[in-house]
Image (cartoon, rainbow, N blue to C red):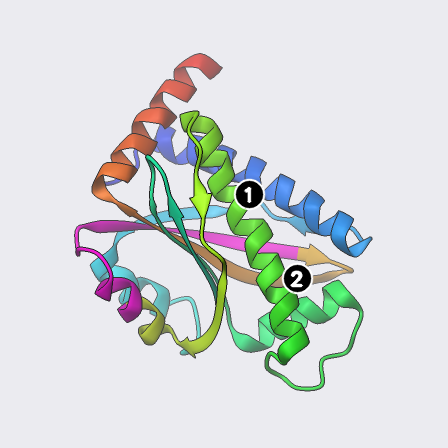
Amino acid sequence: MELNHDQHDALVELLNIGFGRAGASLSKLTNQRVLLEVPRVAVHPITHLNQSLGKIVEDRVASVHQVFKGPVSGDALLLLDPIAASTLTELLTDVPSLTLELDASSREVFTEVGNILLNACLGTFGNLLSVPISFSVPEVDIASIHEVVDRLLEHGDGFRYALIVTAGFRLRDSAVTGYVVIVLTVQSLKRLLEALDRWQLTDE
């Protein structure tokens, strides 16, 4: 299952709306301007996820993971390498990080960033489909990318797809790149694509 050109553009437009909301929420939280760049989106079968993510992230990643449920259900993750995650929390809080990886306070900030960003993306999907989406409590972990993907593969069938969204954070003349991964069942992805098609028709 692949996105056609129009669906891809519509999805980027929707995610950009979600990113705008997330940036506004982070700006309000930190009292400084936070911009999220126009996202790039790719769709892969979940069985190709290790290979796809292995090309763009280092072996170890800091992740925020949330399960979401509703007519569209699945898993959502924010992934950054641990140093980038620590850098991002330092930029957001103005508190120098004592280590190159996430300490307890950095984990708390990173969790909140993930919560805001993932909820903004998935909330946009919920609005598009006119359905409520509920979220689990976010979980933070630092592990190899293969461990993260293997955990996703263990829960649920292999007939799922992953949207990989490149998320660029820009604040105080610094840039940090992360990745949002949204894992959907075939049925959920079909519903999303059908909703994108309807949205495009009403938007014309």
Q: Nearer the viewer, residue 2 or 79?
A: 79
Q: Is residue 156 magenta?
A: yes
Q: Which residue is mark 1?
A: 120
The residue drawn where x is 63% and y is 68% is 108
User: Which dot marks residue 175?
Assistant: 2
SS at mark 2 in the image: strand
Q: Is residue 58 left or right of residue 197?
A: right
- Residue farthest toward the bottom in the current orientation of the protein: 99
Is residue 60 shown to the viewer in this render? no
Q: In the shown orientation, is residue 94 left or right of residue 42?
A: right
Q: Amino acid at mark 1?
A: Ala
Tell me the SS state at disc 1: helix
Q: Position of residue 203 (x, y in %)?
A: 48, 16
Which is nearer the eye, 24 or 177?
24
Residue 145, position as x, y percentages in the image: 37, 73
In the image, what residue occupies the spot 48% across and 29% down?
127
